Amino acid sequence: MKAAVLALTPGGAELASRLEPCLAGAGYDPVLYLPERLAGGGTAVPFSHPLRELVAGLFPESRALVLVMALGIAVRLLAPCLRDKRTDPAVVVLDEKGEYAVSVLSGHLGGANDLARLLAAFTGGRAVVTTATDVLGLLAPDVLARRFSLVPDPFDAVKPVNAALAGGETVPVYSEVALPAEEGLLWRPWEARDEAGYNWRVLVTDRSGEEGPGILCLRPRRLVAGVGTRSGIGPEKVLEALAAAFQLAGRSMAALSALATADLKAGEPGLVTAAARLGVPLYAYPRTRLREAIDGAGLACSALVEGKIGVGGVCEPASICAAGTTRLILPKTARDGVTVALAEAAWP
């Protein structure tokens, strides 16, 4: 996770350089940017072009921005860059003495609130966090989503759920999967998810069919789709086959974590484009590995496929390889030249 650290003054540059090991220890890959006059001969990346251009370039490619400068300057730099809270990076602004670390942008999903607390603890300063649920000591569902790599579905429900919490309403959480009982939320048994008496309920599940008014689903991204295709299949056909497979399995596409296939299919434009549209990686496995998965899981082989590509199956063993399991939740399905199988990876 790239963290771009920017400073403008000598004092700010000194503080920014000290933050690098703190960020690295938290799992970030920090890169320090300084004006040419301050960069010296160290590891900092010098810049001479306008700061606005630098920030505009770093914004979409960074997981976090740490700006050691006046808050007003930061706000003016950031304003033209804002797009969507699901994709905007976490932004924290510090004064050059490190007395305050202000969470400015993407406090929940981006992790800016936690980053501000981390940096304030490192500098001996104070984190400034203004999101209502944090101020009230409540755990917002989108914070829970970030901690456990859950996908809010529908995303538009996040805001009213947080508003309900901030307004004093009780919002229960029903989890189909085992999660640590984080404080700040009311945890209820999964079997009680249909109980009445609440304006909003949060369901942690990858099942489809649980959606409805007053429900925010948090989807664990634990499902892998193994995919085989005929040569030249377009991305629309791949996406249609995936949607049909998920519907057949009774699972939500929001829980998809990756596509998997055979190495000789790794460059298929339809597969590559489909993975890009879904925002998931495409894993490709050698046929020797697929053969081992077939034998290990006792999967059926196709003599026709074996004769064509040298292994008796693609979608089923590929999904098993990517998920690290031997159990399929949906065996091979076929649709318009695309085969799909689903496997469930360990989670969280």
Image (spheres, grey):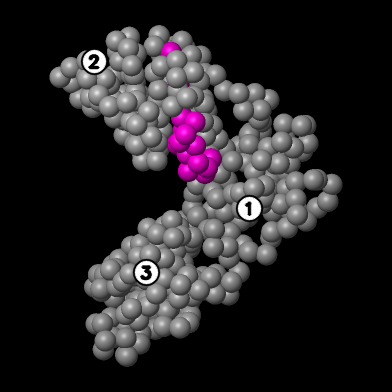
Q: Is residue 89 magenta?
A: yes
Q: Is residue 278 magenta?
A: no
Query: Marks 2 and 1, Cα distance to the nearest angstrom?
Result: 46 Å
**Three-letter code for the amino acid on which mark 2 is drawn:** Leu
Per the image, the residue denoted by label 1 is: 154
Q: Is residue 84 left or right of residue 337?
A: right
Q: Please tell me whether mark 2 sits on a helix, a strand or a loop.
A: helix
When asked about the image quadrant of residue 244, the answer is bottom right
Query: Marks 3 and 2, Cα distance to the nearest angstrom?
Result: 47 Å
**Three-letter code for the amino acid on which mark 3 is drawn:** Leu
Residue drawn at x 32%, y 80% as measured from the top left: 231
Q: Nearer the viewer, mark 2 or mark 1?
A: 2
Query: Taking 315 as reference, is 177 above or below it?
Result: above
Per the image, the residue denoted by label 2 is: 38
Q: Residues within 10 Å of mark 1 (few under 14, many from 20)?
A: some
Q: Where, quadrant-wise, is the N terminus in this rendering?
A: top left
Identify the mark nearer the N-term, 3 or 1. 1
Residue drawn at x 66%, y 28% as measured from the top left: 132
Q: Is residue 203 visible?
A: yes
Residue drawn at x 29%, y 30% as measured from the top left: 31
Numbered range of the magenta stretch: 78-95
Q: Quick check: marks 2 and 1 in contact, CB under 8 Å?
A: no
Identify the mark nearer the N-term, 3 or 2. 2
Q: Quick check: marks 3 and 2 in contact, CB under 8 Å?
A: no
Query: Taking 202 as reference, is 6 above or below it?
Result: above
The mark found on residue 271 in the picture is: 3
**Three-letter code for the amino acid on which mark 1 is drawn:** Pro
Identify the mark nearer the N-term, 2 or 1. 2
When asked about the image quadrant of residue 42, the answer is top left
